Amino acid sequence: MSSKYYAKPLNDLIRALSGLPGIGGKSAQRLAFHILSMSDGDANAIADAIREAKSRMKYCSVCGNLTDTDPCGICADRTRDRSVICVVESPRDAAAVERTGEYRGFYHVLHGVLSPMDGIGPDDINLRQLLTRLQKDDDAKELILATNPTIEGEATAMYIAKLIKPAGIRVTRIAHGIPVGGDLEYADEITLSKAMEGRREL
Amino acid sequence: MSSKYYAKPLNDLIRALSGLPGIGGKSAQRLAFHILSMSDGDANAIADAIREAKSRMKYCSVCGNLTDTDPCGICADRTRDRSVICVVESPRDAAAVERTGEYRGFYHVLHGVLSPMDGIGPDDINLRQLLTRLQKDDDAKELILATNPTIEGEATAMYIAKLIKPAGIRVTRIAHGIPVGGDLEYADEITLSKAMEGRREL
């Protein structure tokens, strides 16, 4: 919601902010006025943080996670368990698993799930890279499928399992400790730990 | 909420966003990931809008409202009613009155209210400018006090009324009562008292 009662730069800011998820017209106005009331330094720090994050954050060429180094900090960490790769839908899901503090393996971020209804097939997610990675990687013994327990997440897990199992790698699925229809990102650490712990062979 | 599981530029963005009002840690994360998923153009447009608004929006030297021109569009509008000035606490309040579409006078934005408890006295709000303005302005016949119906807003209105009335200018206060569409049953006692007190003959 912009308004003809505000000057253009303010309206532009309100419009830009109201394009963000969960920010309605009134919130965008409140945020815009708050930003105008901040010191130049503080307000420009937000602008800089956006530009900075946008220009410096890339996807890891190994696992596909968001990172400012390549390979990312996790892929470059030699103390981690090379035998396990956890497949997740998004960088936020990888961060959620990391927060449990119990997983010490690697990740592979799909950036989506198979969804034929939306026209998203195997080539539209970061899946080919997973296969190439597994072909080169002799250390990987287990693939933990931690896609969300949604219809698409389950289907994607099944699809990957079918694809990978012939290669002799153990393929597991996190347990349904997470409520079906819920979101990995919002699961508490204990539930997510339980889910990791209760994984079963597919 | 920032996380050691995110790279620094992402963490910096999350931290910057979580400093905004009404944006908690989870919201800041969701917003940050959304911004990273936007095109460079769209993301940088937000950054630019912040910088642009911050550098171009000033306070009108006449009324104190937020503007990118001086005097502001309202003060410069010769078709408006020069005989009335509406005193409000903030630019958002001025915009709220404008949205009624029924007020055609000018504004004066105080940028706060008197609040001795918080150490905010007459010199800390845009009050001296109002007096100077009224001294120079022979057209102003009525001052509408539209500060909020809070303790501080009421006290500020009383203070301004006392100050201005001797100059022979009509000083009025916006009515307080039951909001249109509101329910008598759920109105608080003070609002209902004000509504009874401000009753008018039909």
Image (cartoon, coloured by chain):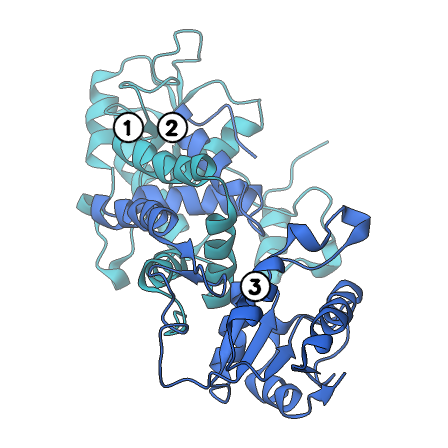
Chain colours: A blue, B cyan
| Secondary element type, mark 2 | helix
In the displayed structure image, the side of residue B153 where residue B165 appears, left or right: left
- The label shown at residue A9 is 2
Amino acid type, residue under disc 1 in the picture: Arg
Q: Give the residue at x 39% y 56%.
A: B17
Distance of mark 1 from mark 3, alpha carbons? 52 Å
- Rendered residue at 23%/23% (across/down): B133
Name the residue nearer the viewer: B5 or B76.
B5
The local secondary structure at tag 3 comes to helix
**Residue B158: % across, % down:** 35, 45
Q: Compared with residue A69, is residue A154 higher up or lower down, i.e. above or below?
A: below
Q: Would residue B166 be seen by someone viewing this image from the given angle?
A: no
- For marks 2 and 3 on the same chain, the one whose residue lies earlier in the sequence: 2
Q: Amino acid at mark 3?
A: Thr
Instruction: Point out the image quarter for the N terminus of chain B.
Output: bottom left
Residue A149 drawn above or below residue A141? above
Would you call the spot at circle 3 few (<14 residues within 10 Å), some (14-19), or many (20 or more)?
few
Secondary structure category for the residue under label 1: helix
Mark 1 vs mark 2, CA separation in Å: 7 Å
Q: Quadrant of residue A80?
A: bottom left
Please provide percent x and percent y for residue A119.
76, 46
Residue B202 found in image quarter? top right
> Which of the chains bears the disc numbered 1?
B
Q: Are marks 1 and 2 in contact (CB under 8 Å)?
A: yes
Return the residue nearer the eye: A109 or A34: A109
Residue A178 figure quarter: bottom right
* Residue B56 circle label: 1
Q: Residue B33 in the image: x percent, y percent?
A: 49, 56
- Could you tell me which chain the residue with mark 2 belongs to? A
Which residue is under mark 3? A132
